[in-house]
Amino acid sequence: MSLLGKEGNKVRLDIDGQSYEADIVMAENGACSILHDSHSYNAELIRSEGGKNYQVNTLFSSYSVDIIDSQAKYLRMRKSSEEKQGDKVVSPMPGKVVKIPVSEGDLLSAGDIVVVLEAMKMENSVTTDYAGTVKQILAHPGDNVATDAVLVEIV
């Protein structure tokens, strides 16, 4: 299962390659109300100690759901991409460039934000893992970029 998008209580999910839209309202006690295709469902969510797994109980069924942290997944992918790219910061995912808070000639430290991308209606900060000087900015606000597109060169 993958979260495709979220706006308020409306959620778009991909479950085994099929897209679903639902309206989900959570209560503080772990109960939730789900409205899908004009049908109402109630479920109980029990979070594991580590928070990466939930037991979802419905009236007739029980499911174990593993939570995959998309941002951590993309950061791992980005790190491996950056290792291949050398002194280039690349896009960890497809998205739209919202902001570039650096300029050519700026001195950067590891962890500095170099680009802000919007993907799936969420803003994601793209950071550098190493210190250096911004040599060239290859992306511009408003640009749509693909995964592994070179955004900034650092020397």
Image (cartoon, rainbow, N blue to C red):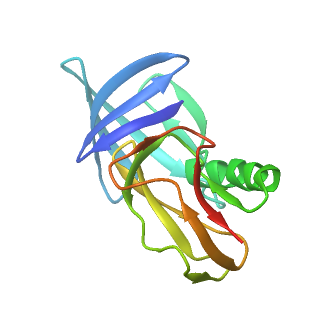
In depth, the one of 44 and 149 nearer the eye is 149
What percent of the width, then of the height, locates residue 45?
Answer: 47, 46
In depth, the one of 75 and 23 nearer the eye is 75
Examine the image and state in which quarter residue 41 appears: top left
What percent of the width, then of the height, locates residue 46?
Answer: 52, 49
Q: How many marks?
A: 0
Horizontal arrangement in the rendering, residue 87 relative to residue 70 (left or right): right
Point 47% across, 53% down: residue: 139
Horizontal arrangement in the rendering, residue 7 relative to residue 149 (left or right): left
Location of residue 133 with respect to 58 vertically, above or below: below
Location of residue 61 with respect to 51 vertically, above or below: above
What percent of the width, then of the height, locates residue 71?
Answer: 57, 53
In the picture as drawn, the residue positioned furthest to the left comes out as: 38
Examine the image and state in which quarter residue 117 appears: bottom left
Horizontal arrangement in the rendering, residue 41 relative to residue 62 (left or right): left
In depth, the one of 43 and 141 nearer the eye is 141
Point 71% across, 79% down: residue: 131
Location of residue 71 with respect to 115 vertically, above or below: above
Point 35% across, 55% down: residue: 141
In depth, the one of 140 and 5 nearer the eye is 140
Quadrant containing the C terminus is: bottom right
What percent of the width, then of the height, locates residue 116?
Answer: 44, 61
Quadrant containing the N terminus is: top right
